[in-house]
Image (spheres, rainbow, N blue to C red):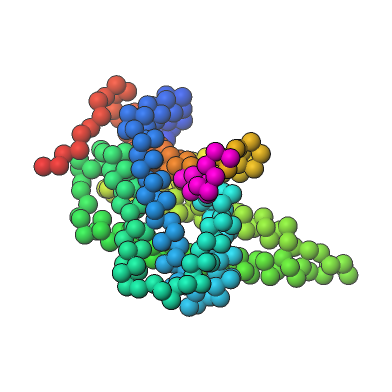
Amino acid sequence: MPTIIDEHALYVAKHPGTFVLQTLKAFRANQGLLLAGAVAYYALLSIVPLMILIVIVLSRLVPQHVLLAALGHLLQWLVPGQSTALVRELANFLAHRAVIGWVLLLTMIFFSSLAFTVLENAMSLIFVHRVVVRRRHFLLSALLPYCYILFLGIGLLIVTFVSSGLEAVGAEGVELFGLHVSLQGLSRVVLYLLGLAGEVFVLTSIYMVMPVGRPSLKHALFGGIVAAVLWEITRHVLVWYFATLSQVSVVYGSLTMAIVILFSLEWLATLLLFGAQVISQYERFGLEPADAPPQEIKTA
């Protein structure tokens, strides 16, 4: 089996242009931009309830201001340029969390799972060659979003402790040959690299879990690295664009934050689905004719 995988990778390396072209054509045929718009819309509905639920639970273990600071660092990767505004709105909501009843709590749990459900359906269209072979039990699909919410909460808790420790080390510095050397720059670099590694890990886990069928860690890691690199480039371009050229605040006024977040989430969803398309095309590249018609999902 390893030999087959190596030969497959060698075949892709010999025909990179054909592979990229077929991937783009398949992404367009699957209406990837339309799927990304649906994922981004439900992610916009889910992000605030999801953050509220995670912070409410973790605030019993970590001071709220420390937790919100760590959450702000994470949101810089998710919604560049709008993390401060989101954290501020989240803090205002948490200041009045005593009014949260069971009905509102269940509503937040429901909305926080919508994006995962839509993402799973989009993955089914991209990995249609897996769906026709093996289908996922509906109970597993129903529980999957809430398992992800649990792991996201654990990940946020770990990030909170790590970022707090790095900031403390950077603020104290070290004594070297009688001179005080600041480690703030080093701590920022380490924090950025850890964030990038966490980004690749999250994307890889999505590609491992969301698509139907038996996943491959190598394929999932390949798609995760592709999506993470593309998102890092896009994220910095978005920050520069909104800070220098964009006139979105003039056009949309009070709706600016929602529009910018939706735009960022759509780009992120597009790259997330494109990474999935890269994995799907890699699994089939060289095994199917280039002009083979797309498979249909059998629902019977």
Q: Which of the pair 166/213 is nearer the observer?
A: 166
In the picture as drawn, the residue positioned furthest to the left comes out as 300
Depth check: 262 or 269 in front? 262
Seen from this angle, which residue lies furthest top? 291
Q: In x, y percent, where is residue 5?
A: 37, 39
Quadrant including the C terminus? top left
Task: Tell whether 254 sits left or right of 27.
Answer: right
- Chief secondary structure of the magenta portion: helix
Name the residue: 63% across, 70% down: 165
Tell me how many marks there are.
0
Residue at 65%, 66% in the rendered image:
166
The quarter of the displayed image where residue 148 is located: bottom left
Query: Up-down: is 52 above or below 42?
Result: below
Q: Position of residue 203 (x, y in %)?
A: 44, 50
Question: Residue visible at 41% across and 74% down?
Answer: 99
Q: Which residues are magenta?
A: 250-262
Q: Is residue 274 above or below residue 173?
A: above
Tell me residue 110's x, y (percent).
31, 61
Seen from the viewer's position, the closer of residues 230 and 281 is 230
Residue at (62%, 58%) from the top-left corner?
191
Drawn side of residue 130 relative to residue 104, left or right: left
Residue 242 magenta-highlighted: no
